[in-house]
Amino acid sequence: RAVRRIAERAATETDLAGRRARVTHGTATVHGRRADVSVDVRLPYPAVLGEAGERVRGRMADRVAELSGLTVRAATVRVHSLSPDRAAPQPPPA
């Protein structure tokens, strides 16, 4: 459970151009000294999905390894949805 929480927290701490992802679900499986972690996230819109997903994945893997001492074998990020950034300028109505 602690490894899952670390992964979820790391995902939400990832800087995405001053915005943050929100975790909708997370899992972690530990086998000896190895861990597989996965999160489903809601990303701020607009976002470059590949870049944002890779940043979340990298941060999650690094923090889990750093804080737990485990080797992260697999780190998976699934984009569950996109959420409009309320601070971003909205296009004028058509």
Image (spheres, rainbow, N blue to C red):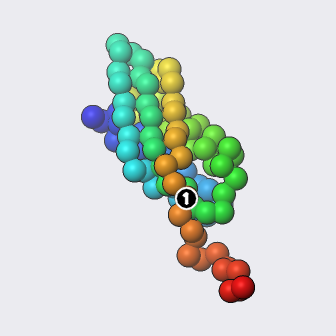
Q: Report if residue 66 is visible in the image.
A: no
Taking the spot 41% from the left edge, 23% from the top edge, the residue there is 35
> Badge 1: few (under 14), some or many (20 or more) residues near its Cα, within 10 Å?
some
Taking the spot 50% from the left edge, 20% from the top edge, the residue there is 73
- From the top left corner, tell me how far across and down residue 26 is, in percent: 38, 40
Q: Report if residue 49 is visible in the image.
A: yes
Would you place residue 26 above or below residue 87 in this image?
above
Would you place residue 50 above or below residue 90 in this image?
above
State the count of labels: 1
**Residue farthest toward the top in the current orientation of the protein:** 32
The amino acid type found where label 1 is placed reads Leu
Specify the quadrant that holds the N terminus: top left
**Residue farthest toward the front in the current orientation of the protein:** 94
Would you place residue 86 above or below residue 73 in this image?
below
- From the top left corner, tell me how far across and down residue 32 is, in percent: 35, 13
Specify the quadrant that holds the C terminus: bottom right
Would you place residue 45 above or below residue 62 in this image?
below
- From the top left corner, tell me how far across and down residue 41 is, in percent: 48, 49
Q: Quadrant of residue 19?
A: bottom right
Secondary-structure class at tag 1: strand
- From the top left corner, tell me how far across and down residue 50 is, in percent: 68, 44
**Residue farthest toward the left in the current orientation of the protein:** 1
Left or right: 53 with respect to 80? right
Taking the spot 51% from the left edge, 54% from the top edge, the residue there is 81
Viewer-proximal residue, 52 or 78? Answer: 78
Left or right: 44 with respect to 51? left
Taking the spot 55% from the left edge, 51% from the top edge, the residue there is 14
Left or right: 68 with respect to 90? left
Viewer-proximal residue, 23 or 90? Answer: 90
Give the residue at mark 1.
Answer: 82
Q: Quadrant of residue 15?
A: bottom right
